[in-house]
Amino acid sequence: MTILDPPADGTAEQPALAATATIAAPDRRPRSATRPTLLLLSVGIVAAWIAVVVSAAHLHVNPAIHEAALFLHLAAVVLGFGAVLTVDWVGLLWILRQRTLSAVAQAAHTAHLPIWLGLAGLAVTGALLSPHVSSPRTAVKLGAVLIVALNGLYAGQIQQRLSRYGDGTPVPRALLLRSMTAAGISQAGWWTAVIIGFLNAQT
Ligand code: HEM
């Protein structure tokens, strides 16, 4: 078995046969149709991010609203990051051949809404927390948030491509590497934001 083979899900191994069959089996329709949509969504994310950063620099709320925003900020961390961790955990189990590819697809599909709701909630509540946007540490955090959001779009695309492969079908190494890279970028971004948020709250 190589890393390209399907996870252990009870399907019999047929290395040579499977390798030949899978070259033709996956749907390889051109992706150009979705590119304008992706570009539009990316521009929308960058525009929303700029709006959050600019408004955060000018918004000053009273202590009661600040307290409520901090509570909601932490709730949004739980919602968004919790959903991301769940999907990545199922993905890791798939790599370790403990789950099927369709289980990963199902987890990713289910977690899609809470992840984006969490991220949007973090941006809105974060803007109410009067961040020092000119401080280098906060700038790194905000940069990490932008990367997490753009990477989320990219990860969605990868997930769509992965879902074209059945549970018994080997996934190309390049696609596997891309999905692992996207997961790594996501984890690095979320942890950077969490750690800097925690450090900023201490000072
Ligand atoms: C992935 C996105 C984000 C994550 C995971 C995250 C996480 C956190 C965490 C864990 C804290 C610590 C709270 C505490 O210990 O009391 C925090 C605080 C904070 N966050 Fe975020 N955050 C995110 C996005 C944002 C954004 C977009 C902004 C601003 C626009 C922001 C502004 C702040 C501020 C100002 C604080 C300090 C609050 C205070 O103590 O006054 N965060 N964040």
Image (spheres, helix red, strand yellow):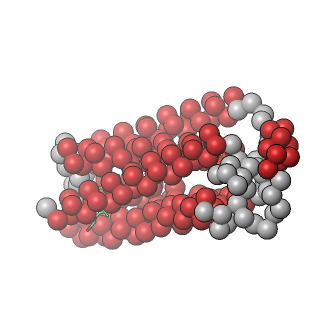
Residue at image point 43% right, 55% down:
187
Q: Position of residue 14 (x, y in %)?
A: 83, 53
* Quadrant assignment, res 129: bottom left
* Quadrant containing ligand 1: bottom left
Q: Is residue 13 visible?
A: yes
Q: Position of residue 21 (x, y in %)?
A: 85, 43
Q: Position of residue 171 (x, y in %)?
A: 70, 47
Residue at image point 45% right, 63% down:
81
Left or right of 194, for residue 32:
right
Residue at image point 63% right, 31% down:
35
Left or right of 21, for residue 79:
left
Q: In which quadrant is the C terminus drawn?
A: bottom left
Image label count: 0
Residue at image point 56% right, 32% down:
39
* Quadrant assignment, res 161: top right
Q: Position of residue 63 (x, y in %)?
A: 20, 67
Compared to residue 78, the image places residue 164 above or below, namely: above
Left or right of 151, for residue 135:
left
Of 101 and 199, which appears nearest the observer?
101
Q: Is residue 25 visible?
A: no
Of 3 and 187, which appears nearest the observer?
3
Q: In which quadrant is the N terminus drawn?
A: bottom right
Left or right of 57, for residue 3:
right
Compared to residue 73, the image places residue 196 above or below, namely: above
* Quadrant assignment, res 125: bottom left
